[in-house]
């Protein structure tokens, strides 16, 4: 499936890919340089009976590497970090191995609250788990690579139009000033031109600028014409413009989730103040901000947005609207991240048949919901139910393309 989605999965292990050498921070420093965890897409930690050898800042090299991966994820939303614990029993080989298991148990108890981990009993179970989880990552990454929605253009041109006031029909005259403005800004092919229109209040400065903007928008002379108000230094309008141009969505897709949050937070505050909580643009921004919070490990903050947003969607759009279904699924996933498994299952069990009936059994969102429910079942110890759903998910994915 990965090549079909434009990805290549290459496994890196220090046992096979590191080299002999010296490093001022010891062997782990050499492994860090070769491993490049900060730039990895996926980091997988697998534990059984042994925890490892202590390093300068951790109880084992694996713990050190996972901590680096978690730090990178909090900063940029990547890599995906997967942690697995084998529960298969095995004979203890003395006091040393007993100590190793104790250290491993302490490590598992101290995992970050954002980390969802998995257990398995045998290699075949692990193969099913890791295959399903990697498939999920590839599908999600492929969806993130889709280009953001195109900005809405002016109907008669390709100019992106933002916030420009309409000229007053009765406004007349000022032809001399318009010609002077045309002449000054006409030098823009040779330099960056800034023009200020001055004068007493009420003489028509705003209308003069608006007439110029409308004339050139319809002529297609500019790619972007934006009206930025200066009352707050332009912050509010610039945040709106960034969202309009899809910059926050592009930041999210590129892993710059913190940059996306910096756009969404002031934008949402302005939309709630100006448009109200129930305006379609406000609803969209609320959803996007919650998604970005979840991507940076702020699952509780995401839930605080998703829960009232879901109630608003159900009341305004109806329980079967696609946006309502998506918000419902995202709320369940955030609950699952916090290991509030029973609550997640209570949402996902009725949601899955709704997706199958409304979107289709093989729709990507239906497959994602089925995987999420399987994950919740597995955490809750309902292994047979999880395996059944995982099998259905893989069958649906095969029907949509090679694995």
Image (cartoon, rainbow, N blue to C red):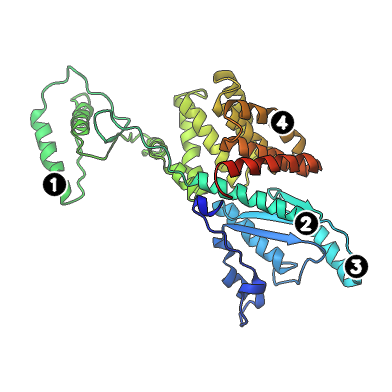
Q: Which residue is mark 4?
A: 349
How many angstroms separate mark 2 from mark 4 (CA)?
Answer: 27 Å
Q: Which residue is mark 3?
A: 92
Q: Where does residue 164 sit, x and y in percent of width and height? A: 29, 29
Q: Residues within 10 Å of mark 1 (few under 14, many from 20)?
A: few
Q: Answer yes or no: do the residues labelled 1 and 3 have beta carbons within 8 Å?
A: no
Q: Is residue 343 shown left or right of residue 8? A: right
**Mark earlier in primary sequence (2, 1):** 2
Question: Which residue shows up at 50% across the image and 38% down it?
Answer: 265
Mark 2 lies on a secondary structure that is: strand
Q: Where does residue 150 sit, x and y in percent of width and height? A: 38, 37
Of badges 1 and 4, the one in the foreground is 4
Q: Is residue 255 visible?
A: no
Q: Residue furthest top?
A: 170
In the figure, 333 relative to 26: above or below?
above
Q: Which residue is mark 1?
A: 187
**Mark earlier in primary sequence (1, 4):** 1
How many angstroms separate mark 3 from mark 2 (CA)?
Answer: 17 Å
**Mark earlier in primary sequence (3, 4):** 3
Q: Residues within 10 Å of mark 4 (few under 14, many from 20)?
A: few
**Mark earlier in primary sequence (1, 3):** 3
Of badges 1 and 3, the one in the foreground is 3
Q: Which residue is mark 2?
A: 85
In the figure, 43 relative to 176: above or below?
below
Mark 3 lies on a secondary structure that is: loop
Q: Quadrant of residue 337?
A: top right
Q: Nearer the viewer, residue 235 or 223?
A: 223
**Mark earlier in primary sequence (3, 2):** 2
Q: Residues within 10 Å of mark 3 (few under 14, many from 20)?
A: few
């Amino acid at each position: 499936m990965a090549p079909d989605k434009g990805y290549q999965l290459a496994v890196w292990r220090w046992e096979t890919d590191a080299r002999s050498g010296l490093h001022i921070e010891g062997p782990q420093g050499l492994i860090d340089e070769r491993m490049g965890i900060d730039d990895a897409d996926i980091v997988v930690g697998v534990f059984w009976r042994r925890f490892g050898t202590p390093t300068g800042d951790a109880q084992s090299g694996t713990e050190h590497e996972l901590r680096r991966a978690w730090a990178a994820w909090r900063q940029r939303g990547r890599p995906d970090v997967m942690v697995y614990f084998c529960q298969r029993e095995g004979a203890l080989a003395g006091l040393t191995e007993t100590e190793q298991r104790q250290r491993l148990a302490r490590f598992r108890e101290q995992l970050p609250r954002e980390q969802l981990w998995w257990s398995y009993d045998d290699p075949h179970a692990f193969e099913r788990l890791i295959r399903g989880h990697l498939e999920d990552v590839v599908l999600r990454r492929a969806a993130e690579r889709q280009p953001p929605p195109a900005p809405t253009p002016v109907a008669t041109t390709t100019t992106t139009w933002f916030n420009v006031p309409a000229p007053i029909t009765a406004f007349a005259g000022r032809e001399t000033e318009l010609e002077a403005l045309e002449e000054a800004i006409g030098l823009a092919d040779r330099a960056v031109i800034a023009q200020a229109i001055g004068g007493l209040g009420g003489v028509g400065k705003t209308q003069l600028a608006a007439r110029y903007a409308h004339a050139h928008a319809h002529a297609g002379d500019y790619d972007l014409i934006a009206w930025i108000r200066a009352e707050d230094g332009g912050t509010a309008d610039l945040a709106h413009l960034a969202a309009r141009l899809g910059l926050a969505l592009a930041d999210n897709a590129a892993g710059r989730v913190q940059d996306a949050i910096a756009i969404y937070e002031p934008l949402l505050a302005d939309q709630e103040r100006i448009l109200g909580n129930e305006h379609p643009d406000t609803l969209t921004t609320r959803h996007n901000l919650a998604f970005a919070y979840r991507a940076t490990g702020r699952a509780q903050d995401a839930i605080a947005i998703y829960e009232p947003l879901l109630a608003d969607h159900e009341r305004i759009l109806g329980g079967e609207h696609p946006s309502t279904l998506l918000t419902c699924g995202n709320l369940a996933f955030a609950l699952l991240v916090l290991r509030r498994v029973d609550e997640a299952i209570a949402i996902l069990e009725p949601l899955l048949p709704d997706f199958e009936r409304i979107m289709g059994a093989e729709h990507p969102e239906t497959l994602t919901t089925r995987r999420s429910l399987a994950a919740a079942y597995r955490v809750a110890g309902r292994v047979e139910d999880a395996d059944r759903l995982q099998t259905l998910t893989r069958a649906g994915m095969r029907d949509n393309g090679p694995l």
